Amino acid sequence: MKNILISFVIFSPLVVRADLPLNIEDIMTDKGKLKLDASVTYINSENSRSELAAPIYIQTGSASFIPVPTEIQENGSNSDMLVGTLGLRYGLTGNAEIYGSGSYLWREDRQFDGESSKNRDKHLSDVSLGISHTFLKDDKNPALIGFLEGTLYEKSRGKALSGKSWLIGATTYRRVTDNTGKTLPGQEIGRHRSWESKSTDRSWKNRF
């Protein structure tokens, strides 16, 4: 079985600024600004197998027969799937944003089992809406961002659903450089282990 995955992601802010160095916080949308996200994912899946076919039946008794295959038949399948996603983010405040996205799916399945067959399907896959909030910025503490996302529409196995899927979670991170590009204490190349102290550590948080 062979699988191929190709993904393209585009982040296109509607308001562009040339601030250097780039901070991770810049990923969050500024207050009153819009940000466009787009991605395209392509997946190819292939499965092949051999089976015994075209049997002849040999009588072994008055009412018993056994099949004896006379051919080896190559069976298999190949699938292509393309998913396009378009999203929009809006900054409510400097620490919070709302976002929405929609995905459209195109799929083609091909079967090879003596006779070739082909099935195609294309439909709106899902539409979701969410909100994220920065509770802690990456300063003295590692950053902490929480989010809540709900699915307004989703189609699975031919059935359309609404409000059945919810996602809540949080992410945290810590930069290794400050705004000037200088390495933070404890984060340089050859940094010490987290359970060991170092003269440049200002607190236990600098070990991480």
Image (cartoon, helix red, strand yellow):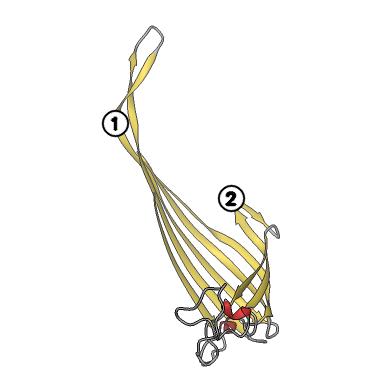
Please indicate whether residue 20 sits to the left or right of residue 110 in the image.
right
Query: Dot 2 surroundings within 10 Å: few (below 14), some, or many (20 or more)?
Result: few
| Image marks 2 and 1: residues in contact by CB distance under 8 Å | no
Q: Is residue 90 above or below residue 42?
A: below
What is the secondary structure assignment of the residue under circle 1? strand
Furthest toward the top, the residue is: 62
Q: Residue 62: x percent and y percent? A: 39, 6
The amino acid type, in three-letter code, at marker 2 is Arg
Nearer to me, 71 or 205:
205
**Whether residue 180 is situated above or below residue 54 in the rendered picture:** below
Say above or below: 113 vs 90. Answer: above
Badge 2 marks a residue whose secondary structure is loop
Q: Quadrant of residue 185?
A: bottom right
Residue wearing tag 1: 71
Residue at left 56%, top 72%?
A: 86
- Disc 2 versus disc 1: distance between alpha carbons? 36 Å
Q: Position of residue 60 (x, y in %)?
A: 35, 11
Label 2 vs 1, first from the N-terminus: 1
Q: How many marks?
A: 2
Residue wearing tag 2:
157
Q: Residue at x 63, y 65 (%)?
A: 127
Please give left or right for residue 19 compared with residue 138 in the image.
Answer: left
For the C terminus, give its image quadrant: bottom right
Please name the amino acid that badge 1 sits on: Glu
On the image, the x and y values in percent for residue 142 come to 62, 78
Q: Residue furthest left?
A: 70
Q: Is residue 193 left or right of residue 163?
A: left
Residue at image location 40% in from the left, 12% down from the top: 64
Residue 140 is drawn in which quadrant? bottom right
How crowded pointer 1 is (Cα within 10 Å; few <14, some 14-19, many 20+) is rated as few
